[in-house]
Image: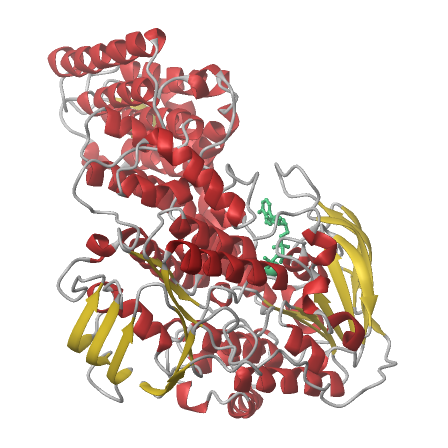
Amino acid sequence: MIDLHDVTVRFGTRGEPALDAVSLQVAAGEHVVVAGPLGAGASTLLRLLNGVVPHLVAATVIGRIRVAGLDPLTLPVYAMAGHVGMVLDDPGLTATQGTVAEEVAFGLESLGIPAGAMRPRVATALHDVGLDGLDDRDPATLSGGEQQRLALASVLAMEPSLLVLDEPATNLDPAGAAALLAILRRLCVGRGVTVIRADRDACGATSGATRVVRLAAGRIAADGPPDPDAALGLPAPLGPRSPTGHVVLAVSDVSLTYPGAATQALDGISLEVRAGEVLGMTGPNGSGKSTLARLATGLTQPDAGTVVVGGLDTRVRRPARERAAAAGLVFQDPRHQLLAATVREELALGLRALRTPEPEISRRTALIAERFGLGPLLDRHPLRLGRATRKVVAVAAIRAMAPQLLVLDEPTIGADDALRLLIAQEIVDAAGEGTGVLVLSHDVRLLALVADRVLVVANGRITASGSPGVLLANSLALAGAEAASAPAL
Amino acid sequence: MNSLFTFVPGTSWLHRRSPVAKLAWFAAAVGIAFATYHPVPLAVVAVTGLALAALSGVGRPALRTMAVLGPLAASIIVLQALAPATCVAPCLVAAQVGPFAIGGAGLTRGVSLVLRVLAMETWAVAVLVTTHPSDLFAGLRRLHVPYTAAFMGSLTVQLVPVLGRELEIVLAAQRARGMSARGFGALIPALRPAFVATFERVQGMAISMEARGFGLAGARTSWRYVGLDRVDQALAILGAVALVAGVGAGIAWWGLDSLPVVVWPAAVAVVVTAVSAAAFGWLLVRALVLTARG
Ligand SMILES: Nc1ncnc2c1ncn2[C@@H]1O[C@H](COP(=O)(O)OP(=O)(O)OP(=O)(O)O)[C@@H](O)[C@H]1O
Ligand SMILES: [Mg+2]
C-alpha cells in the first residue's frame, strides 16, 4: 500500500532535512503508529502520502514514493483523494463548510456520490464519531474535541483504503480516544483498510496497532511490533503540597447557554481555587471546560451566578490591564492566542500592557524563554511554529505576566513526554510562587503530575471531585458519567 | 461586525424563496444601480431593498449596515456639495451659507452616489442575510456558473465572517494579555494578526478541501438540493426582466453616467448638507477621541 524508497525532504534550503533517506513499506491492512518526539518528522512523513508535501506545502523531495500504486509526487493532491483520507493535526483550521453535515458531505460531493447515497453515509459517519444531532451547527462553534471528531467524520465518510491520521486523539476525551481505536481496528480487520497515524504518546495509545515505527531526527530509529508491556501508568505527583492560601477564584452556581443552543453549556457550576493550589478539571468533549475557562478569566460573562477573581466580581468593569494581572488564560487553540511577529515580542506583549519597565521586560523575557527552552526560537514568527511549540509560547507568554490566577486550557495539546514534563514543572513552580492554577485537560498524566484536586464535569455539571490518584486511576471510568448518555465516538 | 452580511436563520417569505430567484433580483438591483445616476430610480431600488429586508424580519441588520455606512455617506455628500471641483457648467449654486456655496450638481452627485451604494447594500443584506451560504452556492451552480467561480464567489462571501471571527478572537486574545481591547485603538493592532490568522485559515481550508478531492474531474454531486417551485420560477423570470428593463431604461432614459439636472430648493439643499456635515463631523470627532484614548 505504501512504498517509500530513500526519501529525503527538505523545507527551505538551510538546515537539516525533515526526513533523511527514509525507506518504509506498509502492506494493506496494517495499522502503523509513527512515534517519536516533536520535530522528528512524523507529520512530514504523513503529508507526503497524498502529496500535500510538496504540492501545497513547499518542499524539496528526493526519492521514490508509491501509495496505492500511484505517485503522489506527480499527481495533484485531489487525484489521491479517492484512495487516501487524511486528517491534519489542527482541526481548527480545516473546516470549510457552513454546517457540520455539509462538512462531512464535502468529500462525498467531490467523489460524485449521488445525493441519495450521501445522506446515510453522512449520518453514519457523524454517529460513529459521536456527533449525532449536531448536523446543522456551524463548525466554528464546536468545542476543540468536537472539531476533531468532525475532521475524522469527514474523512471516514469517504471510505478511503488508506487512512492517514496526524495525532487524531489529542483533542479527544479518553472514551473518544478508545472509541476511535475501536473504529480503526474494525476498519483494518474487517475491511482491510490500511491505517497510518502519528502518535507522540509513546505508551498506551499504541493499542490496536500492528506495528510501531519510531522516528528520531528524520530517520527511522526503530520499527517493530508494539511493546505489549507499554501500558499507561500514572506518573507520581511532582512534589506534594498542601495549599492553604486565600481564595483567588470563586465560581458560584454559574450557568451559561450559547445563543440558539438547546442545552446549557454550563449548568450550575461552583468551585474555588486557592493561592498556591492546582485544581485539575477533566471531562468529556463538549462538557463545558473551555467555556468555564473563559468565564473564570472574565472574558465572557455567565447568564446566572457569579465569578469572583482576586476578590472582585468579573462583572465589575476594570481596566484590561488589571484584569489580566489578576487572571491569565491560555486558550485551548494556540492559534487564537498569538499576536506578535516574533516569539520575543510575543513574550513581551503582556508585560508591556502591564506597564512593566523596559529593562525588567527584557530580563523577564530572557528568563522565561530560557525556562521554556524557547531561546533558539526568539526571532521566529510564532505562527511558523508547530502546534505544540505554539502552545508552549502561549503558556510562556501568560506565565511571564505572573497573574494571581492562571487558567490553562489543554496545555499539553500535541506535546511529547519531555514537553509534558516541562509544562508540568512550570505549573508546579507557579503554584509554589503562590499562584492559583486551574488546569482543564484530557491529559490524565499531566493532571496526575500536577493536580492537588480534580473535578470531573459532564454536560456542564460537576459530577465528581477528589484526589487525583483515585479519580484518574481509571481514565476510562472518568468518562463513564458521560458515556451512558452520549454515543461513544 | 461579523453579523452584517451573514446568514440569519429564519422562516420568512424571503428565507423560503429559492436562491435562484433572489440572485436574479439582486442582479437587477445591482444592474440598475450601475446603469443610472438618477436619484429617483436609485431611491426606489434602495427603499424596496430595505422594505424587503424589513418584511423578512432582517430589517435590523439592514439598518445596522446603513448606520455603519451613514457617516461615510455623509462625508461623500458634504465633499461633493462643497468641493468646487465637482462644479461643472452650468454650475448651479443651490444655496449660499456664509462663505460656503452649495453646488447643485455636486449635491446631486453626492446624493446619487450614496443612493447607489444604498441600493446595492440593502439588496445585498436582504439576499445574504436570508440565504444560507451553501444555498447561495447551490443557486449559482443551478444558474450554470462554473463550479470554481461559484465556489470563489461563496468563499468571498464567507471570508467576511471568517475575517470577522478571527478579529473577534484576536480581540479576546488581546484582552487576555491586558491590552485594552476597545474601540479603534484596539482595532488597529488587531488587524495584522487577524489577517495573518485568516491567511493561515484559508490555507488550511485549501489543503483540507484538496485532500478531500476538490478539483477532481467528473460531475460533483450536491448535498443541498435547490428546488424551484412555480412562484420561484416566476420570480426568477421577473427578476431577469427587471434586470434587462432596468439597465435598458437606465441607459436609454436617464443616461449611464450623465447627471440629471435637479433644481434643489435652497432650504432642502441646506438641510441635506447640514445633516451630512453633522454626521461627518461626528465621525471625525469620534475617530479622534478613540485614537487619542488608545
Ligand atoms: N459559540 C457557540 N455556540 C453554540 N454552542 C457552543 C458554542 N461554543 C461552544 N458551544 C457548545 O458548548 C459546549 C461546551 O463547549 P466547550 O468548548 O466549553 O467544551 P469543552 O469541555 O472545552 O470540550 P473539549 O474537550 O472538546 O475542548 C459544547 O457542546 C459546544 O458544542
Ligand atoms: Mg475545550
Which residue does the image show at 56% across and 91% down from the upper left?
A371
Give the quarter of the image for residue B251: top left
Closest to the observer, A311 or A91 = A91
Q: Colour mode?
A: secondary structure
Closest to the observer, A127 or A274 = A127
Q: Position of residue B225 (x, y in %)?
A: 35, 25
User: Is the residue A338 above or below the residue A452 in the image?
Assistant: above
User: Is the residue A78 above or below the residue B71 in the image?
Assistant: below
Please give left or right for residue A386 compared with residue A369 in the image: left
User: Is the residue A336 above or below the residue A79 in the image?
Assistant: below
Which residue does the image show at 36% across and 29% down from the upper left?
A116
Closest to the observer, A185 or A197 = A185
Which residue does the image show at 57% across and 65% down from the upper left?
A331
Is residue A87 visible in the rendered structure shown here? Answer: yes
Closest to the observer, A455 or B59 = A455
Please give left or right for residue A405 compared with residue A164 in the image: right
Give the quarter of the image for residue B237: top left
Q: Position of residue A125 (x, y in %)?
A: 46, 45
Q: Position of residue A57 (x, y in %)?
A: 25, 67
Q: Position of residue A18 (x, y in %)?
A: 29, 82
Please give left or right for residue B264 compared with residue A354 in the image: left
